[in-house]
Amino acid sequence: MKTTKIGYARVSTREQNLARQIEQLQAAGVTKIFQEKLSGKNAARPQLQAMLNYLRDDDEVIVLSLDRLGRNSADLTEIMEAIRHKGATLNILNLPSFNSIEDPNLRNLITNIIIELYKYMAQEERETIKVRQRQGIEIAKRQGKYHGKVREYGPHSPNRQKRYIYKEACRLLTRREQGEELTKRQIARMLGIAPVTLYRIEKYRAEDQIKAAN
């Protein structure tokens, strides 16, 4: 049976570009690519699950780097086991290649050892970053410089487009409350955002109104 090369590409936000990953996957001979713009904080990603369901015996899953599949060791282990359960193999382009080793069992053993090492290193790096962030926040609090995380959508968002979307969403929600026939789904469609994003903005708006009233 001929091996089918299947790619998976992921970035964390809509503003990021998938072009580089897709280009490198195509250069590696991938014929089908599953792609999405979602955080890798857990494995509940539609295109990831679609790829796992699509896999057949002897397929080869190709990703640019291990963190495209997941961000923590437990999720990565679960995803890799799902790939193996389907009879497919995993190829991570930025890891060393052992294709020159003729014995497939030895090749898979060495590859798995390298992957486990990278998983451990990635987990340690994330934990170190979290500790440093907590330490930085504590220092900023003591110095009176910490004001909390700036919301992604809001009047003070660092992203100009998201500041505009927040402002327009508030305006349209006000019109809806005043009796205009606008559904929340229509408002989300007008702004080019997902309904869940509009619900989040509505929650932020309510919080801002309470703060303004106090």
Image (cartoon, grey):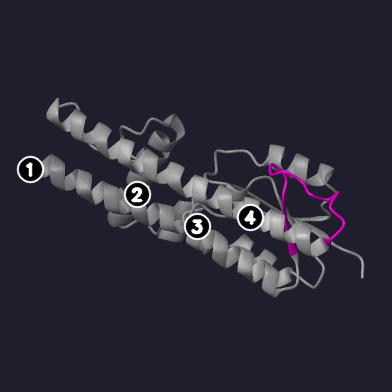
The quarter of the image holding the N terminus is bottom right
Left or right: 74 with respect to 23? Answer: left
Q: Classify mark 3: residues with Cα within 10 Å, few (<14), some (14-19) or many (20+).
A: some
* Among numbered discs 1 and 3, the one appearing first in the sequence: 3
User: Which residue is label 3 attached to?
Assistant: 73
Q: Is residue 75 left or right of residue 51?
A: left
Query: Is the Cβ of the residue at disc 4 closer than 8 Å to that at disc 2?
Result: no
Q: Which element carries disc 4, helix, strand or loop?
A: helix
Q: Which mark is residue 113?
A: 4
**Left or right position of 195 against 103:** left
- Is residue 48 placed above or below 87 in the rendered structure? above
SS at badge 1: loop
Q: Could you tell me how far apart the alpha carbons at marks 3 and 4 are, in whole angstroms? A: 14 Å
**CB-based contact (under 8 Å), mark 1 and mark 4:** no
> Badge 2 local density, few (<14 within 10 Å), some, or many (20+)?
many
Disc 1 marks a residue whose amino acid type is Asn
Q: Position of residue 83 (x, y in %)?
A: 68, 67
Image x and y of residue 140, in percent:
20, 29
The amino acid at mark 3 is: Ser
- Residue 146 visible from this viewpoint: no
Quadrant position of the C terminus in the picture: top left
In this figure, which residue is indicated by the disc labeled 2? 201
List the single residue furthest toward the right: 1
Which residues lie in the magenta part?
89-103
Q: Residues within 10 Å of mark 4 (few under 14, many from 20)?
A: few
First of labels 4, 2 by sequence position: 4
